[in-house]
Image (tube, grey):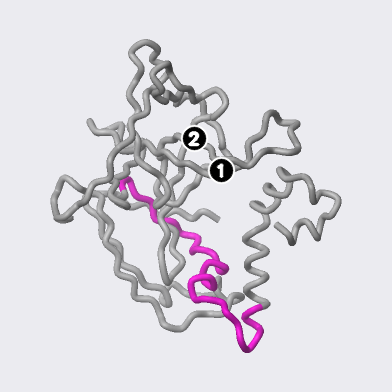
Amino acid sequence: MEFLKKKYPAKSKKKKWLQDEHNRTFIYWLRQKVEIQLNESRNNISEALRWIAHGPRPEVIKYQGYEINGYHFHTKERDDLRVVQNSGVYLEANTFQISSAKDKNPVVANMSFYGVIQEIWELDYNKFKIPVFKCDWVENNHGIKKDELGATLVNLNRIGHKDDCFILASQPIQVFYVEDQLDPRWSIVIVNQRREYIDDSREDLGDIILENQNSSNLMPPVESFDKMSDDDLAYIRTDINEETLVENVD
């Protein structure tokens, strides 16, 4: 952020603009900083940071289910075919809050987000993989409310935050949405409890991902990442009774 303030002094006090520009340009800034550091004989660039600067492979593995942090998540598409519901997510994040589109000085505070998982992606950085959820998020101003008993209700048809739909799979808490009998436009939020799975071979778990990464010990320089052949990269993915979709997201 300090880099942007120095580069654009005329906009150094516009917090919303600085945050948006930071989000838009951060990966390019990071890649440049890593490249500069790698050209020095001594640098503190970790292997993980080096691969993050490269960016993930263009192919994305998509799942219908993912188990993490004691939760068993499904996509909305899979939920629609089942009796149980596992696609609801809740996240509390520190973010800018604005009063209107013309508000140039937003306030930074914690905000609650409620959503539904639409897609589950696994980003492959060769040395490690990062699962992310693509969600439809309820619009905060008019899509979330409290009733007289203090319960949280959401209108799942009011979708917002369309430019910021991805979260790390490790971040959310799982929630259930129960239709309000007095007004079907609204759903009552019920927080799910984490579960400890002892025997992960049980059929009722399903969708469990088992990985075995066998990548080369030699890591290419930043500029040659895109030139690597598929023979240089190896991974094994096993899931249970699930269709795997591989898409190019370039």
Please state the horizontal and vertical placement of residue 172, each as a whole percent of the image. Answer: 41, 45
Q: Which of the 4 image quarters holds residue 103? A: top right
Which residue sits at x=22%, y=52%?
240
Residue type at mark 1?
Asp
The CA span between labels 2 and 1 is: 9 Å
Most extreme residue toward the bottom is: 41
**Residue nearest the viewer, comparing 123 with 152:** 152
**Residue nearest the viewer, comparing 37 with 206:** 37
35 sits left or right of 187 in the view? right
The disc at residue 164 is 1
Which residue sits at x=77%, y=45%?
14
**Residue nearest the viewer, comparing 43 with 250:** 43
**Which quadrant: the C terminus?**
bottom right
173 sits left or right of 32 in the view? left
Please state the horizontal and vertical placement of residue 81, each as a whole percent of the image. Answer: 27, 33
Q: Please, is residue 188 above or below residue 170 in the view? A: above
Q: Please, is residue 241 above or below residue 87 in the view? A: below
Crowd rating for badge 2 (residues with CA inside 10 Å; few <14, some 14–19, many 20+): many
Please state the horizontal and vertical placement of residue 55, each as a whole percent of the image. Answer: 54, 64
Q: Is residue 38 magenta?
A: yes
Q: Is residue 189 magenta?
A: no
Residue type at mark 2?
Trp
Which residue sits at x=41%, y=76%?
231
Give the magenta part as a residue range: 37-65
Which residue sits at x=49%, y=55%?
248
Kindly indicate whether the residue at mark 1 contacts the one at mark 2 (C-beta within 8 angstroms).
yes
Please state the horizontal and vertical placement of residue 76, each as a whole percent of the image. Answer: 36, 36
**Element at label 1:** loop
Label 2, on which residue? 137
Most extreme residue toward the front is: 149
Most extreme residue toward the top is: 182
